[in-house]
Every structure is written in C-alpha cells, then in structure tokens.
Image (cartoon, grey):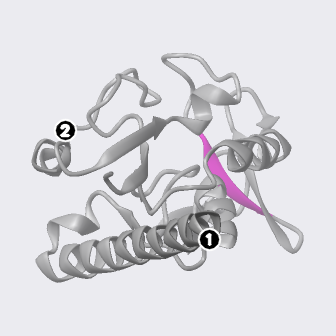
Amino acid sequence: MKPKILISKCLGFENCRYNGAIVQFDLLDKMKDQIEFIPLCPEIEIGLGLPRESLRLIKVHDGIELVQPKSKKYLTDDMKKYSEEILKDISDIDGLILKGRSPSCGIKDVKVYSGMEKSPVIGKSMGLFAAEMEKHFLYLPIEEEGRLTNLIIREHFFTKLYAIFNFKKMAQSKSMNKFADCHAK
C-alpha cells in the first residue's frame, strides 16, 4: 500500500497544458516508487482541446467565474459539474498536488480579473477545481508543485500526507482485526 495523490496531469504525466506542453516536475521522479498517483486534467475533462485558448477567473457580481476570453465561454458550471463527478471516483485519496497559478488548479495566487479581456487584475484566488477539491478534502494536504520546492513546505506536506495515510492504514487494520475476531468466535 502507498499513499494516493491526486495530481495535475500536466506535472510530468502528459502534454496537456493549454499550449500543449508538459511541466517538468523534478520531485515526481523521487516520489514515483513511494506514491500512487492519480493524474487528471480538469480542463481536458470538461472538453477543452489541445492546444486551447487560455482561461481566466473574472469577478462577476459577488462571485468568481471561470471563462475563456477569446471564445467568451463561461465554464464555471462545467468545471463544478466535473468536480462533483470526479469526487465520486476519488474519495480514497491521501493528498493533492496541483498546478500552481492555474485558473483551474492553482491553490494560491491565481489572478482574478475585472473583466473578460484587457482588464486589470483585481485580486487573487484559488482555481475553480482546486477550490472544489479543498471544500471536499479539507483535512488533506493540498499543495502546488512550485511551492513544494520550498523544503519547509515540502516537509509539512509529506508529514501530513504520511500521518493521514498511516492513520487510515492503522484504522483499517484494526477494523479488519475486529472483523476477524468476531468470525473466529
């Protein structure tokens, strides 16, 4: 058994960034024998192709919308629907590593614009997919690949990851032992 991490597919798994590129994620090679990865790209999963026009977050009234400025498409509902669907399949994970600054996956410092095109940045937020994952997996370690280059952040991430993983393993083992004890009597 290994900890399971949901990870952005563009982080060394597949050329699926908006420009068709892949992100070199050096830590991936060091982790691949100790971690089970579940790679995904929410932008591809909601039907956006490769290469694709860039996305951005914009402030609309009291909320934030995920949009594709060039096509003028609002993708918030599609991303939220996908997030709900994927949560049914990935309930048993131990952590998440997502692509930083992405309007879908970024967990910090994602630019929020005042409008669709040629508008100023008015704040920072989480990417839409990342925000949905954080709501559901509030207790799990969630980090961006860029922040994991910081040794202190990396240590905190892996300490929390393995604490949760080992606790789940121990709880599962105890429940299996109780089950075995009941049937032995």
Residue at horizontal 51%, vertical 16%?
50
As measured in the structure, the alpha-carbon distance from the residue carrying label 2 to the one carrying label 1 is: 55 Å
* 84, above or below 124, in the image: above
Residue 155: in magenta span: no
> In the rendered image, is residue 97 in sight?
yes
Residue farthest along the right direction in this orientation: 61
- In this figure, which residue is indicated by the disc labeled 2? 24
Q: Which quadrant of the figure contains the C terminus?
A: bottom right
Q: Mark 2–mark 1 contact, CB under 8 Å? A: no
Q: Where does the image place residue 25, in percent across and percent down from the top left?
A: 20, 44
Amino acid type at circle 1 is Lys
Number of other residues with Cα within 10 Å of mark 2, as a class: few under 14, some 14 to 19, many 20 or more:
few
Q: Is 60 left, or right, of 10 in this rendering?
A: right
User: Magenta: predominant secondary structure element?
Assistant: strand
Q: Position of residue 72 (x, y in %)?
A: 78, 33
User: In front: 139, or 116?
Assistant: 139
Secondary structure category for the residue under label 1: loop
Q: Position of residue 173 (x, y in %)?
A: 45, 68
The outermost residue toward the top is: 50
Please report whichever mark, 2 or 1, sits nearer to the chain's N-terminal start.
Answer: 2
Kind of residue at badge 2: Gln
Crowd class of label 1 (few under 14; some 14 to 19; many from 20; radius 10 Å): few
| Residue 119 in the figure: left or right of residue 34 | right
The secondary structure type at the circle numbered 2 is loop
Which residue in the structure is indicated by mark 1?
185
Q: Is residue 51 left or right of residue 1?
A: right
The segment highlighted magenta reads 55-59
Looking at the image, how many numbered discs can be counted on the residues? 2
**Residue at figure coordinates x 72%, y 48% from the top left:** 83
